[in-house]
């Protein structure tokens, strides 16, 4: 676990150590905002968990943490978007809780990145919990060939999902869980075909809702 600037500097100063780490937990990084681009040398990092920390604005244009597959961000501030995730093409799981994020991907920043093809092609799960500032995941529909679960809890300003009628080829494998469930009626769909295709994927099964509640604790 990294919780101080000196601890991070010690890690970054040892390339051999950096190459050996595949999971990193950063907690309480408050005195100085965390520069995610500084972690770019961790070529084998696959899991990143950042809690109760401040982020620095990232101006990265080259691949960053290309092997990263799981990201959890909880109780973090200083970041309006997570556009840098486009530089992690192997992302499978993204979980954001109690954090100040307005967009997952910002259109203007994404336009400045090079070498990006179709984002989130390997993504299997998205989980947003208590992120009231969140307004957008992506500005237009995307293909999500592997997405199986989307959980949205207490995100009242997220009104539109980045889906169209062809976004999920195997629609029967997708489950969308929204709390409160009334928010389902507030979503703005790309068209009527999209709405009809995704409506059956919303589920309120008791077991699933209990699982979501435990995940929030």
Image: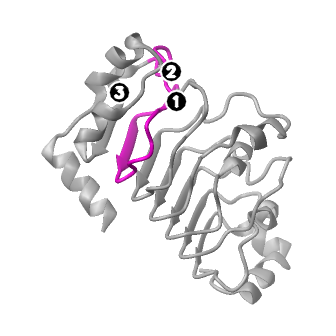
Specify the label residue 173 is tagged with: 3
Above or below, 33 relative to 181:
below
The earlier-in-sequence mark between 1 and 2 is: 1
Which residue carries the number 1 mark? 162
Question: In the rendered image of this protein, does residue 169 appear above or below residue 79?
Answer: above
- Residue 34 colored magenta? no
Query: Which of disc 3 and disc 1 is earlier in sequence?
Result: 1
> Is residue 7 rendered to the left or right of residue 125?
right
Q: Of residues 59 and 44, which is closer to you in this image?
A: 59
Which mark is drawn over residue 25?
none
Colouring scheme, one of rainbow, by chain, secondary structure, one colour: one colour
Q: Do tag 3 and tag 2 residues touch (Cβ < 8 Å)?
A: no
Q: Considering only vertical position in the picture, is 184 above or below 21?
A: above
Mark 3 secondary-structure assignment: helix
Residue 17 image position (x, y, % from top left)? 77, 74
Residue sitting at x 25%, y 59%: 213
The structure residue drawn at horizontal position 47% and vertical position 19%, both measured from the top left corner, is: 190
Start-end of magenta stretch:
145-169
Number of other residues with Cα within 10 Å of mark 1, as a class: few under 14, some 14 to 19, many 20 or more: some
CA–CA distance in space, label 1 to label 2: 8 Å
Q: Nearer the viewer, mark 1 or mark 3?
A: 1
Q: CA distance from mark 1 to mark 3?
A: 17 Å
Quarter of the figure that contains the C terminus: bottom left
Q: Quadrant of the N terminus?
A: bottom right
Residue 152 part of the magenta-drawn span: yes
Q: Residue placed at 54% from the left, 38% from the top? A: 123
Give the number of marks.
3
Residue 96 sits above or below residue 25 on the image: above
Residue at image x 56%, y 23%?
Answer: 143
Write down the residue under mark 2.
Answer: 167
């Amino acid at each position: 676990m990294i919780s101080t600037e000196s601890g991070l500097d010690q890690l970054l100063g040892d390339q051999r150590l950096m190459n050996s780490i595949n999971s990193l937990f950063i907690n309480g990084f408050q005195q100085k905002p965390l520069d995610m681009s500084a972690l770019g040398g961790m070529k084998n990092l696959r899991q990143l968990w950042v809690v109760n920390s401040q982020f620095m604005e990232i101006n990265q244009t080259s691949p960053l943490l290309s092997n990263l597959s799981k990201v959890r961000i909880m109780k973090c501030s200083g970041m309006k978007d997570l556009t840098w995730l486009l530089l992690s093409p192997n992302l499978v799981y993204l979980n954001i809780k109690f954090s100040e994020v307005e967009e997952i991907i910002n259109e203007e920043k994404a336009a400045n990145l090079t070498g990006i093809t179709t984002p989130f092609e390997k993504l299997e799960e998205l989980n947003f919990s208590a992120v009231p500032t969140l307004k957008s995941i992506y500005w237009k529909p995307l293909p999500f060939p592997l997405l199986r679960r989307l959980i949205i809890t207490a995100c009242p300003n997220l009104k539109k999902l980045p889906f169209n009628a062809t976004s999920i080829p195997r629609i029967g494998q997708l489950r969308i869980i929204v709390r409160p469930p009334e928010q389902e009626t507030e979503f703005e769909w790309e068209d009527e075909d999209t709405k009809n295709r995704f409506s059956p994927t919303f589920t309120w099964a008791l077991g699933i809702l209990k699982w979501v509640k435990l995940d929030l604790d």
